[in-house]
């Protein structure tokens, strides 16, 4: 039986960043006790139908680190009591620099968390302010020191590039400061200007100027080269790791492995069906209490959906897609079906095919979305 992952969504944040459209809410802390009860109930009930071993757990958000002491251990204990969790499972928690303290970090490591992802975005105070972050560079350094002091060895830091007013030197200073903290993984996300976020509205109303596309591409090229020089290997378009520290949870999702999602707006992919949960805390709690699940959308994947998704997600990875897997699993010969496009992209030096794998070249990574559109 295939091993599967678990994702738990924590929809609470201390304040809302100006670029973010993840499902997360401020000033809803009074719901935390009820939310926790609902989560535990959802986990218990789901475990009765699923016997697969769990090899990755990802507690994301929102801001899981802003939960009161004891909450993360309650969630993880519930998963471990109800599911068979691989003793070597990768267990990640996402946190903000200003909500990490010694007691929480100790609790996380004691209950089995072995990977921590800290959102920094930038070390430049004026940029942090511009994007609505409420921590300082020093909060980040303190958080990493605390995490190291309790014994965490696998730490990621999220940084953002392509921000309005950001310069290449800002990116360089941020990446240097992060690498100095002995982290094992850096996620380097290019800003997506999400509709109706305060940053989007400020750009639309001409209060802030968006970085030009050319500048944003050059910034990504710079970050890629600089991170490579610092010893971080790009294994996915936005993800860089010291060898051996790639995030298993995300790699499994990109490779279409199955996972169960718990909590508000969590998605699951199990037995060829994609499920999504209710998107407000109130609806989620009410549905769990009434029905034992909070699924509001259910979609059976056709073979074509699966082929498209495999190509779309797989091409984000450095080692790309497995041509023989497509043939054996879905009876789809991409080399034949897309022969003309593949020849064209190869001539342009945007893709390569080696050992039955089709992947984007370094040059191809700059126009990945176009390559994906051509190949699906
Ligand atoms: C779900 S957030 C959780 C992390 C944590 N709450 C924090 O912000 O520190 C994960 C990461 O997604 C990235 N992110 C969020 N919105 C983004 C956007 N619009 N464009 C690019 N990256 C974004 C940020 O780097 C953020 O740290
Ligand atoms: S980026 Fe993180 S802290 Fe900011 S609003 Fe989104 S989830 Fe919350």
Image (cartoon, rainbow, N blue to C red):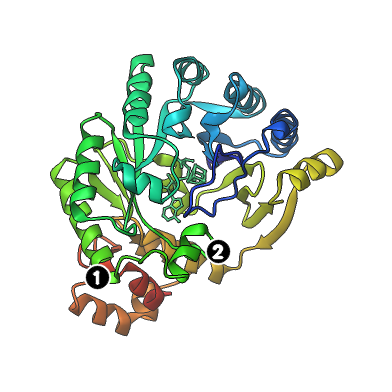
Which of pointers 2 and 1 lies earlier in the amino acid sequence?
Answer: 2
Q: Which mark is residue 196?
A: 2
Which residue occupies the foreground of this view, 259 or 15? 15
Q: Residue at x 29, y 50 (%)?
A: 235
The reply to whether residue 54 is in sight is yes
Q: How far from the left and from the top, in percent, is residue 255?
A: 44, 53
Q: Which residue is mark 1?
A: 214
| Crowd band around label 1 with a 10 angstrom C-alpha radius: few (<14), some (14–19), many (20+) | few
Q: CA distance from mark 2 to mark 1?
A: 24 Å
The reply, left or right, for residue 61 in relation to residue 49 is: left
Quarter occupied by the N terminus: top right
Which residue sits furthest right? 290
Helix, strand or loop for disc 2: loop
Helix, strand or loop for disc 1: helix
Which residue sits furthest bottom? 340
| Crowd band around label 2 with a 10 angstrom C-alpha radius: few (<14), some (14–19), many (20+) | some
Q: How far from the left and from the top, in percent, is residue 92?
A: 46, 33
Q: Residue at x 73, y 51 (%)?
A: 295
Q: How far from the left and from the top, in percent, is residue 374?
A: 37, 78
Q: Residue at x 34, y 59 (%)?
A: 164
């Amino acid at each position: 039986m295939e091993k599967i992952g678990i994702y738990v969504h924590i929809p609470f944040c201390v304040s809302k960043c100006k670029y973010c459209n993840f499902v997360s809410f401020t000033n809803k802390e009074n719901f935390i006790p009820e939310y926790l009860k609902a989560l535990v109930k959802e986990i218990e009930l789901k475990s009765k139908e699923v016997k697969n071993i769990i090899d990755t757990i990802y507690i994301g958000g929102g801001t899981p680190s802003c939960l009161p002491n004891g909450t993360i251990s309650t969630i993880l204990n519930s998963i471990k009591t109800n599911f068979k969790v691989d003793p070597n499972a990768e267990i990640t928690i996402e946190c903000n620099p200003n909500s990490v303290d010694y007691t929480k970090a100790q609790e996380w490591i004691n209950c089995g968390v072995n990977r921590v992802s800290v959102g920094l975005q930038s070390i430049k105070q004026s940029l942090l302010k511009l994007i609505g972050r409420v921590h300082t560079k020093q909060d980040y350094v303190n958080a990493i020191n605390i995490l190291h002091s309790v014994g965490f060895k696998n730490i990621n830091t999220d940084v953002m590039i392509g921000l309005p007013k950001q310069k290449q030197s800002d990116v360089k200073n941020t990446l240097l400061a992060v690498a100095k903290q002995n982290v094992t993984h850096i996620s380097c996300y290019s800003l997506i200007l999400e509709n109706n976020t305060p940053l989007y509205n400020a750009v639309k109303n001409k209060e802030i100027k968006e970085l030009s596309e050319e500048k944003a591409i050059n910034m990504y090229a710079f970050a890629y080269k600089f991170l490579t020089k610092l010893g971080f290997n790009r294994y996915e378009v936005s993800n860089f790791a010291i060898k051996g520290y790639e995030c298993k949870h995300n790699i499994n999702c990109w490779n279409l492995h199955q996972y169960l999602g718990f909590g508000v707006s969590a998605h699951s992919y199990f037995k060829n069906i994609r499920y999504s949960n209710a998107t407000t805390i109130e609806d989620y709690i009410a549905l769990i209490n009434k029905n034992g699940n909070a699924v509001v959308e259910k979609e059976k994947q056709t073979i074509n959906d699966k082929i498209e998704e495999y190509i779309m997600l797989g091409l984000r990875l450095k080692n790309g897609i497995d041509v023989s897997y497509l043939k054996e699993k879905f009876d789809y010969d991409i080399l034949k079906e897309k022969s003309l496009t593949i020849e064209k992209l190869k001539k342009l030096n945007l893709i390569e095919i080696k050992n039955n794998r089709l992947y984007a070249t370094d040059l191809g990574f700059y126009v990945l979305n176009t390559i994906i559109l051509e190949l699906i």
